[in-house]
Image (cartoon, rainbow, N blue to C red):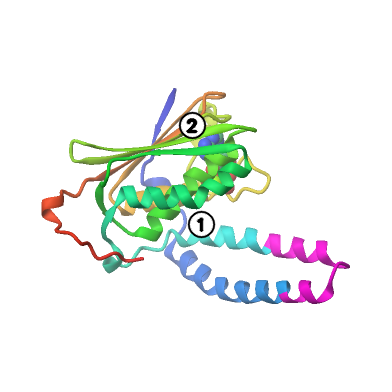
């Protein structure tokens, strides 16, 4: 297996400005999407394909913008104690239908609870970006294993698939802006993930080899339970 650690240097490429512009652009796009759906329903079969294509392209643009948005710094008050196990369960149930569509299966194993500090929606996005790649990497059938555990003051999450994998030079480019091998890819997903993990004071590494699948390992400082009485305020 080749190994690569994510440094901070590569993540500074996209500025806060990009994030604030992205925010502003998202609303009119959503309005446009709504009108396209409305018009599509009204015009019936004739232009169905054209409307579908327009909506699909709009969604692709929205995907790029969503990935950009992850670079905006989360507000300090939205960083709260989180049960990583709960978050992983949520990601599993959100992504299982898509995995099934691609012939894949997600298997989660995690302790009853595992507390860290972070932002729930950003963490979900970071995890979803990884799981989505795994779903796209499995060909016909495959298993995506999500395993979490506590290890000496650290919460460790491994997300591994048995898909196509990557070679060393591809792995070297991982996390660079716009690096994608997919015709429809944005090449921003893992860059956003790296940034989010960094903001949560976590660490991220990737392992892969061609034909051997892919593994992402995330580490976050563990929050000791005695230091954080339940119930936690959940910022969702
Ligand atoms: P995108 O998915 O839009 O291409 P990402 O930043 O999510 O952008 O991923 C960048 C590239 O890394 C992908 O295009 C793919 O080549 C590679 N990659 C990421 N995850 C995996 C994986 N689980 N298996 C194989 N290749 C992967
Ligand atoms: Mg991706």
Residue at image point 69% right, 60% down: 57
Residue at image point 35% right, 49% down: 197
Tell me residue 226's x, y (percent).
11, 52
Q: Is residue 236 above or below residue 221?
A: below
| Residue identified by numbered label 1 | 67
Residue at image point 70% right, 77% down: 35
- Crowding at mark 2 (Cα within 10 Å: few <14, some 14-19, many 20+): many
In which image quadrant can residue 75 be found?
bottom left
Tell me residue 49's x, y (percent).
82, 61
Residue at disc 2, CB closer than 8 Å to ligand 1: yes
| Residue identified by numbered label 2 | 214
Is residue 41 part of the magenta span, yes or no? Answer: yes
Most distant residue in the front direction:
112
Q: Main secondary structure of the magenta part?
A: helix
Q: Is residue 210 above or below residue 204?
A: above
In which image quadrant can residue 159 be found?
top left
**Residues under labels 2 and 1: Cα distance?**
21 Å
Whether residue 12 is visible here, answered yes or no, is no
Choose between 93 and 80: the one closer to the eye.
93
Q: Secondary structure at mark 2?
A: strand
* Position of the N terminus by quadrant: top left
Residue at image point 45% right, 47% down: 92
Sequence-first disc among 2 and 1: 1
Choose between 60 and 25: the one closer to the eye.
60
Magenta segment boundaries in residue numbering:
38-57
Residue at disc 1, CB closer than 8 Å to ligand 1: yes
């Amino acid at each position: 297996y080749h190994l690569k650690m994510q440094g901070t240097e590569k993540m500074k490429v996209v500025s806060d400005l990009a994030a604030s512009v992205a925010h502003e652009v998202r609303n009119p796009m959503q309005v446009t999407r709504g009108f396209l759906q409305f018009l599509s329903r009204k015009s019936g079969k004739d232009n169905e394909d054209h409307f579908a294509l327009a909506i699909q392209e709009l969604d692709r643009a929205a995907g790029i913008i969503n990935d950009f948005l992850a670079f905006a710094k989360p507000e300090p008050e939205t960083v709260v104690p989180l049960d990583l196990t709960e978050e992983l369960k949520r990601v599993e149930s959100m992504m299982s239908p898509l995995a099934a569509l691609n012939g894949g299966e997600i298997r989660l194993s995690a302790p009853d609870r595992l507390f860290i500090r972070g932002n729930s929606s950003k963490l979900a996005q970071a995890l979803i970006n990884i799981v989505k790649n795994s779903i796209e990497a499995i060909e016909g059938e495959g298993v995506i294993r999500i395993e979490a555990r506590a290890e000496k003051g650290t919460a460790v999450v491994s997300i591994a698939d048995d898909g196509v994998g990557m070679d060393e030079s591809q792995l070297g480019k991982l996390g660079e802006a716009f690096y994608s091998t997919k015709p429809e890819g944005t090449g921003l997903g893992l860059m956003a993930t790296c940034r989010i993990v960094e903001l949560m004071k976590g660490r991220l590494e990737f392992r892969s080899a061609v034909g051997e699948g892919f593994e992402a390992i995330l580490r976050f400082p563990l929050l000791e339970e005695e230091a954080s009485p339940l119930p936690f305020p959940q910022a969702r």
